[in-house]
Amino acid sequence: MTVIHEINTLVWLGELSGRYGRRVTLGEVPAEVWDEVARPGVDTVWLMGVWERSPAGLAIALRDESLRASFRDALPDLTEADIAGSPYCVRNYVVDAGLGGPDGLAEARAQLAARGVRLILDYVPNHVAPDHPWLTEHPERLIRGGEQDLARSPEAFIETGGQIYARGRDPYFAPWPDVVQLNAFDDDLRTATVDTLVSIGDQADGVRCDMAMLMMNDVFAKTWGDRAGPLPAEDFWPYVVPRVRAHHPGLLFVAEAYWDLEWALQQQGFDHCYDKRLYDRLVHENAESTRTHLQADPAYQRGLVRFLENHDEPRAAATLPEARHRAAAVTVATLPGATLWHEGQFEGRRVRPPVFLSRRPQEPVDDQLQSFYGELLPAAAAVRDGGWSLLAPTGWPDNDTHRNLLAWSWTGTDSRHLVIVNQSDTPAQGQVPLPWPDLAGRPCRLTDLLSAQTYDRDGEALLTPGLFVDLPPWHSHVLSVGPT
């Protein structure tokens, strides 16, 4: 099972430089820090934002008062030196010299590999910076415009180098002001995308593709119409992914994906796609909504990325009351598929710094939350072994609070685990029939991996009517099941 720890590379290195009283780049991170990063239960690190950022994009951001207001909201003592530009406004897919350059990244990858941890990096397929070399060397790879477009919609087009290009966008929002739109239908762009991803594969073990669904033929055609040219016979990712994997067979492909296109992207070659639906259900909806989501095909679920926050979502500690936060964390940590944790989530950070910034505010560590995550990650690593099954809690005619219980099992070769979560703000009681017939006639011991509490039960009763559960609001059990 893939467990990803996302790190804001620029901010992280800045804080390490302060901690050690010297400039720290990727090639100079102390060994004890890599030990902290490669914590038990994490097998993949996403170093977000390592590529060269665009000076032209930075200049646009500095002129955007709404962006600057968001910067000040996150960092009240903001200075202009804190604004570095967006890591998704890429001038070149070369590791920024200020972060340590390609050699520094190679050392970081080696340090992670020595600890059994993979490295993934970003790729932005939809757009590039306005000073990216392709604008002058390969304009055919971009969506073009004319004088009338610029005059009529200056917010949607940009003039640079004597040419007019469309600004990057998705179909549901205003264009992004600091990037230029690539043309997913252009054959030369597709070839260049393969080359770029092969180069990233030379430097990392996986790639997280930003807004991957924007490049799908039907989405791109609806967004850009005739400007994109004829619809290609083959979709974008089925063209790109196999050609990259011919060079790097084991490269992990992770898609940022929305609009219920996760299954389609899995079929087009991605190993994992963001599970935004689960996020929304855990944050805003109830147990029945989550249970319905978890009834999807297990193969589909294994291809999802479960998360409570990332650099695009609000901090979980600021969004969820602490008890609900913990219940949601147990859920995402123990389901099939990949898990994504965001740097600062374990310490209870509440401020999500815009990715344009090189610094974030100091915040106190939530010691209790940090201790909880310190127990949860290794527990989840132990639990997620073998086959997963969604279980069906039952109740009584005069007590239907079992509807607020979520339950699933994991069955490994030599292990059995049970997870039960009360996803509600009221106590919940129910019975959870266990899926292991050979428990009949055997005394069993259930050990909660988060509290170390043990419960001795008769195996026959665990099968019918099932394990009796009485959970306070937002509480969970993460249980190993074995003989007494």
Image (cartoon, rainbow, N blue to C red):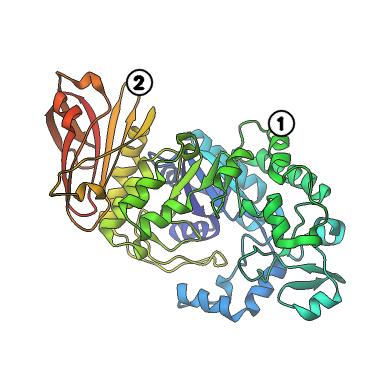
Q: Is residue 46 visible?
A: yes
**The disc labelled 1 sits on which kind of residue?**
Ala
**Disc on res. 413:** 2
**The disc labelled 2 sits on which kind of residue?**
Thr
Give the quadrant of the C terminus. top left
For image coordinates 37% across by 58% down, the residue present is 283
| Neighbour tally class for label 1: few under 14, some 14-19, many 20 plus, Cα within 10 Å | few
Per the image, label 2 sits on a secondary structure element best described as loop
For image coordinates 12% across by 49% down, the residue present is 398
Given residues 100 and 74, the one toward you in this image is: 74
Given residues 13 and 189, the one toward you in this image is: 189
Task: Check if mark 2's residue and mark 1's residue have beta carbons within 8 Å.
Answer: no
Residue 334 in percent (x, y) is at 35, 40
**Disc on res. 470:** none
Q: Is residue 91 visible?
A: no
- Left or right of 479: which side holds 210? right
* Separation of residues labelled 2 and 1 (CA atoms): 33 Å
User: Looking at the rendering, which quadrant does residue 324 occupy?
Assistant: bottom left
User: Which badge, 2 or 1, comes first in the chain's sequence?
Assistant: 1
Give the quadrant of the N terminus. top left
User: Looking at the rendering, which quadrant does residue 199 occupy?
Assistant: top right
- Left or right of 399: which side holds 214? right
- Name the residue beneath numbered marker 1: 246
Residue 240 in percent (x, y) is at 72, 41
Given residues 289 and 376, the one toward you in this image is: 289
User: Looking at the rendering, which quadrant does residue 315 occupy?
Assistant: bottom left
Residue 80 in percent (x, y) is at 58, 76
Q: Total marks drawn?
A: 2
Vertical relation: 72 (above or below) 130: below
| Neighbour tally class for label 2: few under 14, some 14-19, many 20 plus, Cα within 10 Å | few
Per the image, label 1 sits on a secondary structure element best described as loop
Query: Which residue appears farthest toward the front when viewing the image?
Result: 397
